[in-house]
Image (cartoon, rainbow, N blue to C red):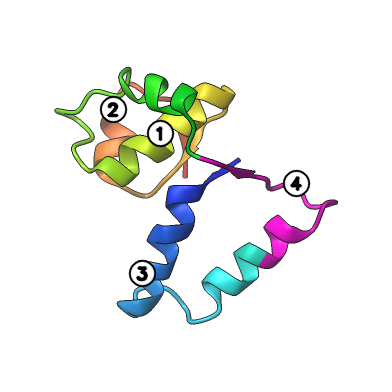
Amino acid sequence: MVSAISLAEIVYLVEKNRLPANAYTELKGALDDPDHVLKEAPCTAEIVDAMRTVPRAQVPDMPYRIAAATAIYFNVPVYSRDGRIRAAPLQTIR
């Protein structure tokens, strides 16, 4: 699952030249492919409820908390290189 907020974050990182220019279009293409393993997860009230379990003191940035809450809601690990997310009591992979 890819949180919709992560798509916005990718646009932001492409604009800051921190990701390749094609990062967003490649991910969006994968999400648009019904046979691809990745699926988009919209930000729902249930995910916002799950966000309450992500410690704000450890993951202070709202987009990262939403991404982590999405993983919690769908019971999948968070894929992140962010040190704060990796240090939080969440199941993560890198």
Cα gap from disc 4 to disc 2, whole angstroms: 26 Å
Q: Which mark is residue 13?
A: 3
User: Are the two marked residues, 1 and 2, in contact with CB atoms closer than 8 angstroms?
Assistant: yes
* Residue ID at (52%, 23%): 73
Q: Which mark is residue 56?
A: none
Q: Amino acid at mark 2?
A: Ala
Q: Which mark is residue 88?
A: 2
- Examine the structure image and report whether residue 39 is included in the region drawn in magenta: yes
Q: Which mark is residue 68?
A: 1
User: Mark 2 or mark 1, which is nearer the start of the sequence?
Assistant: 1
Left or right of 67, for residue 24 = right
User: Mark 2 or mark 4, which is nearer the start of the sequence?
Assistant: 4
Cα gap from disc 3 to disc 2, whole angstroms: 23 Å
Cα gap from disc 3 to disc 4, whole angstroms: 23 Å
Crowding around mark 1 (Cα neighbors within 10 Å: few <14, some 14 to 19, many 20+) is many
User: Mark 3 or mark 1, which is nearer the start of the sequence?
Assistant: 3
**Residue holding disc 4:** 37
Q: Amino acid at mark 1?
A: Ala
Left or right of 57, for residue 25 = right
- Quick one: SS at disc 3? helix
Q: Quadrant of residue 28?
A: bottom right
Closer to the camera in the image, 47 or 68: 47
- Quick one: SS at disc 2? loop
Q: Amino acid at mark 3?
A: Leu
Cα gap from disc 1 to disc 2, whole angstroms: 10 Å
User: Are the two marked residues, 1 and 4, in contact with CB atoms closer than 8 angstroms?
Assistant: no
Closer to the camera in the image, 23 or 34: 34
